[in-house]
Structures are given as structure tokens and as C-alpha cells.
Amino acid sequence: MCSMFSLPAAKPCCIKSNNVSKFLHPPRFIVTRARAQVITAPNKSATITSTTASPHLLKQAIPHSDLHILDIVERQSQASTSLAHQDACRKPEFHPLFLEEAFERCRNICAEYAKTFYLGTLLMTEERQKAIWAIYVWCRRTDELVDGPNAVHMSSAVLDRWEERLEDIFDGRPYDMLDAALTDTVFKFPLDIKPFRDMIEGMRMDTRKCRYENFQQLYLYCYYVAGTVGLMTVPVMGIAPESCVPAQNIYNSALYLGIGNQLTNILRDVGEDALRGRIYLPQDELAEFGLCDKDVIARKVSDRWREFMKEQITRARYYFNLAEEGASHLDKDSRWPVWSCLMLYRKILDAIEENDYDNLTKRAYVGRTKKLLTLPIAYTKAQAPPSFILQ
């Protein structure tokens, strides 16, 4: 359910070329990888802007002292420095025509399944476009393992094998053409393997867990399947040269955008998920409003449900507010898709409200006209300089 790019289930991506193998096995080499660690929610001192704080928003997912985003930022910053001095003989060698076809396939997949986001990437440099498309495709394929047409064949062994393939990608030994696009990307941009591994861990969580006792558990799931995308993409999108805030603040904002997106996906899909036996809502918070699983499964919109939804929507908006603080500190050419994503996901929350909080029998969506009207506004925001300081 990774959501930074908004990934619906779709057809699996297949490679049918008979000429792939001769390009897929460059000399073996190793890229240093960090073991997965735990990511947490923002600390209690985080500023809440443009919304009223509720007790639920102030609940901390995991102690702030356990936050490890800085480790990723430092490793990716060090990798950025080392890329400039990388020994050419250590880079994987792919035939130019093979890479051209690989990225073209990635572009087509992104254009078909993430149309609005794809449009925003067209303002980026060609190298950044290709990298974002490659990351998108890998995230999509990972998501399809659990939610795609072949999900009935899912097992822990499948995810273990997928993680081995990820390691091979970072080692310069891709399995297929789409993997090769990501391999080329990780040797052009300072990507750390940890967020990718964490996303796979989120897929594992999805296979063994269908209830979340509290927001701490739900936040961790949201980080795994969506917050990770923000950490993957910041090195590609780049930080504005004129930005004077710490890189970690910008990474935090990217992570919070993923959290907000995933919380919004959960609220949008409550009814559909319940039909599949999944309830991605904090059980303790449901109980606080006199609700339980039976009420969700019965799909009855009561006054208690409406009040509960108001709290959940406020929380999602809170994370979007945190994300907005860093969007303008990305490189100027990369801001439009981020602002578009942020604004359109906010409109999904608006749509839930317009449906009188009936997300049990109705699916909130943003119509094509509203999307088209939003894009120029997002573009205008993307052109604004990073003139404020992150909290």
C-alpha cells in the first residue's frame, strides 16, 4: 500500500526480451548497506500549524530518541560526496540501448498508473526523471507482491527473495530490465538501501497483521510502506542550493508527506479494506468513540463515526502541514510533483467531509476538473523560493 506515488494494484511488470541476459551481469561489486532501523513519529515539540491540536495528535508513536532518519541523511550525504570520486571500473556497465529501453518502460508505467505525478516529473532534468521513474516502478512492483493480481501466491519466501533481489540491485547485479534501471540509478544518486528494505518490511507486516492496537503501531506501518518513499526520493529531487536549513529537516518533511498520504489512503479505503478483513484504524481510538470492528464491518455511518473521522482527518492534515514546511526547500525543478501530490491528497480529505464522513459505503475521490485546476496552483507554489525556516 505504498502511497507517496499513489500506487493502485495493477498488472505485474513482465520482461519478455530474449536479449536481456547479456546486459544484466556486470562484474560483481558491493555497495555498503545499513541494517534496517526503526523510524518514529515527530516529537512532542513539533509545531502544529494551520490546524487545532487534539490529544490524539500529541500521542507519540515511538520515543523521539529512537529516531534514526539522521543516520540515513548522513549516509546519503557521504555517498553523495563519494559518487564524485567513484572508480569508473566499479560501476555496472549496461549497453546504452538496453538502458534506454529500461527507462522507457519505467516511464510508460509511471505515465499509465501515476498520471498526475508523472506530469510533474516532466519539469525535472532528464537524469532525475529517469531516477524517479525507476524508484516508482520498484515501489509499485513491491506493492503488487501483496496487493497485486498474484497476491494469492504471497509468502514470506517471496518477500525474502525480493529482498535478495534488492541487494543484487545495489550490488550491481540486477535480475531483469526494470531492476537494471534502479541499479543505474543507485550508482548515479546517493541512495541508501535502508528505506527500500524497510518498505519490504512493510509488505511483511501487511501479510501478518490486519489490526493495529494503537497509533504507534499504525505509524510504524505507515512509515514502512509510504514514509520510506520520501527518504528514497530526496537525494534524487535534490535540495535547493539557496536552502539554509538542515538536510534532516527536509528529510523529515518528505517522510511526513508519506505518512499523511498513507493515513489519507486508509481513510479513503476504510470500507473496501473492511470487506477484505483489514482495518487500518487504531483500535484504542475506535474504542474511545464507542466504536469497534463490528461497526466498521457493518458500514453504518453514525454520529460517533463522524466524530471519530473528524479526529483522523485532523491528524492527516497535521502531517501534511509538517510536509509543506519542507516542500519549498527541494530543488526548484523537483517541487511541482511534490506540491501536486500534497494538494491533491488534501482534497481527498475534503471529499470525505463533503460525503458527510461516509467513507464506509462511498469512495472519496478528486475529479478530473479539480485535479486540472489544482495543478497550476501547485506549480505557482513550486516556484516560490524557500524563504522560511523549518521548525
Image: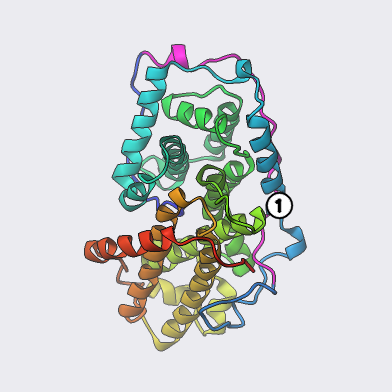
Could you tell me if residue 184 is visible in this image? yes
Figure check: 228 above or below 344: above
- Colouring: rainbow
- Any magenta on residue 42? yes
* Highlighted magenta segment, given as a residue range: 19-43
Residue at image position (41%, 36%) is 126
The number of numbered discs placed on residues in the rendered structure image is 1
- Drawn side of residue 109 relative to residue 40, left or right: left
Residue at image position (57%, 29%) is 187
- Residue type at mark 1 is Leu
**318 or 2, which lies in front?**
318
Q: Quadrant of the C terminus?
A: bottom right
Residue at image position (45%, 11%) is 22
Q: Classify residue 377 by image quadrant.
A: bottom left
**245 or 98, which lies in front?**
245
- Drawn side of residue 220 relative to residue 289, left or right: right
Label 1: state its secondary structure.
helix
**Percent position of residue 21, x then y:** 44, 14
